[in-house]
Image (cartoon, rainbow, N blue to C red):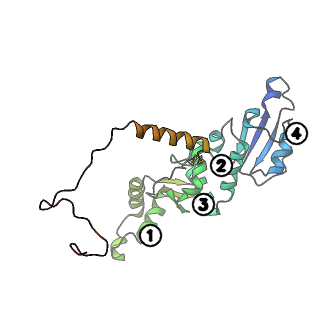
């Protein structure tokens, strides 16, 4: 397939496993651009000799290309094409500031490193904070002193503080990092892991045959029980059990 897409998150070289194993490697693969719709996936499958209903055991991804730092190494060789398309679509749907935050995070030791983390990022972008345009301790110090609202003291006192030294202390306390896109630090939010859907077992209704079999077992079990002793309530004044008639007072006829 020709590179006719300039707006993609990554491209993957999809390869026909059977053709590759048989030595027919010249026409065994093609580049597929993600996000990919059903039409593009079908065209890629057809080009490399796969049926439309091809399953993941029939193909693999030999290489990736992406402008998102770290994403290429996180993408798996063996994956369902739909899972890759879903990841690419969710990353593509990010707002500009959310995507720029991802690019900034990937420049730091806080970067995402595996497939699951990239899948979960669209639901966890608030895990990180990006202050755009912040690229030095001095700039960070001035921001914290005069713009953030975090430092409450008379302006005259702020003038006596070295903004570079103050910014360096803030960065060290935050464990923050400067990037080409700004200052990155953790927000303190918890990272929410993607929870696998629990498959609920379909309710199986017993058949008439099962119902009769169970009823027969219960009847046989009751026949084996010893007869119950005749129990009376506690005697009241030697008169025995007093009968109760609804709607009548005790002792009335």
Q: In terms of depth relative to the viewer, which is nearer, 152 or 226?
A: 226
Q: How far apart are marks 2 and 4 (CA)?
A: 27 Å
Disc 4, SS: helix
Q: How far apart are marks 3 and 1 (CA)?
A: 21 Å
Q: Give whichever of discs 3 and 2 has the lower sequence position.
A: 2
Disc 2 + disc 4, Cβ < 8 Å: no
Percent x, y of residue 1: 86, 43
Q: Distance between the residues labelled 3 and 4?
A: 36 Å
Residue identified by numbered label 1:
148
Disc 3, SS: helix
Percent x, y of residue 219: 46, 41
Q: Please tell me how crowded label 4 is: few (under 14), some (14-19), or many (20+) other residues with Cα within 10 Å.
A: some
Residue identified by numbered label 2:
68
Q: Can you say whether 67 is above or below 234 in the image?
A: above
Residue identified by numbered label 3:
98
Disc 2 + disc 1, Cβ < 8 Å: no
Disc number lying in front (3 or 1): 3
Q: In this view, does 244 lie to the left or right of 210?
A: left
Q: Give whichever of discs 2 and 1 has the lower sequence position.
A: 2
Q: Can you say whether 98 is above or below 3 in the image?
A: below
Disc 1, SS: loop
Q: In terms of depth relative to the viewer, which is nearer, 99 or 88?
A: 88
Q: Is residue 185 left or right of residue 173?
A: right
Percent x, y of residue 202: 60, 47
State whether residue 13 appears in this view: yes
Q: In this view, does 1 lie to the left or right of 246?
A: right
Residue identified by numbered label 4:
47
In the image, what residue occupies the spot 77% across and 47% down? Answer: 33
Instruction: Single out the residue that lies furthest toward the left.
Output: 237
């Amino acid at each position: 397939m020709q590179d006719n897409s300039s707006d993609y998150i990554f491209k993957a070289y999809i390869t026909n496993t059977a053709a590759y194993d048989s030595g027919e490697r010249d026409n065994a693969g093609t580049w597929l651009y993600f996000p990919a719709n059903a039409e593009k996936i079908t065209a890629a499958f057809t080009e490399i000799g796969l049926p439309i209903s091809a399953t993941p055991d029939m193909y693999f991804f030999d290489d990736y290309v992406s402008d998102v730092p770290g994403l290429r190494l996180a993408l798996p060789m063996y994956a369902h094409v739909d899972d890759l398309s879903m990841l690419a679509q969710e990353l593509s749907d990010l707002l500009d500031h959310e995507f720029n935050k991802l690019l900034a995070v990937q420049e730091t030791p806080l970067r995402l490193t595996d497939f699951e983390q990239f899948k979960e990022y669209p639901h966890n972008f608030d895990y990180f904070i990006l202050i755009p345009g912040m690229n030095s301790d001095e700039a960070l110090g001035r921001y914290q002193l005069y713009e953030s609202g975090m430092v409450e003291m008379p302006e005259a006192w702020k003038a006596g503080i070295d903004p570079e030294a103050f910014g360096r202390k803030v960065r060290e306390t935050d464990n923050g990092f400067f990037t080409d896109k700004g200052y990155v630090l953790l927000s303190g939010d918890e990272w929410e892991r993607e929870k696998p859907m629990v498959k609920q077992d379909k309710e199986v209704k017993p058949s008439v045959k099962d119902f009769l079999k169970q009823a027969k077992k219960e009847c046989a079990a009751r026949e084996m029980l010893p007869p119950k002793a005749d129990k009376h309530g506690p005697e009241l004044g030697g008169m025995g059990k007093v009968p109760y008639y609804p709607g009548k007072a005790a002792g009335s006829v």
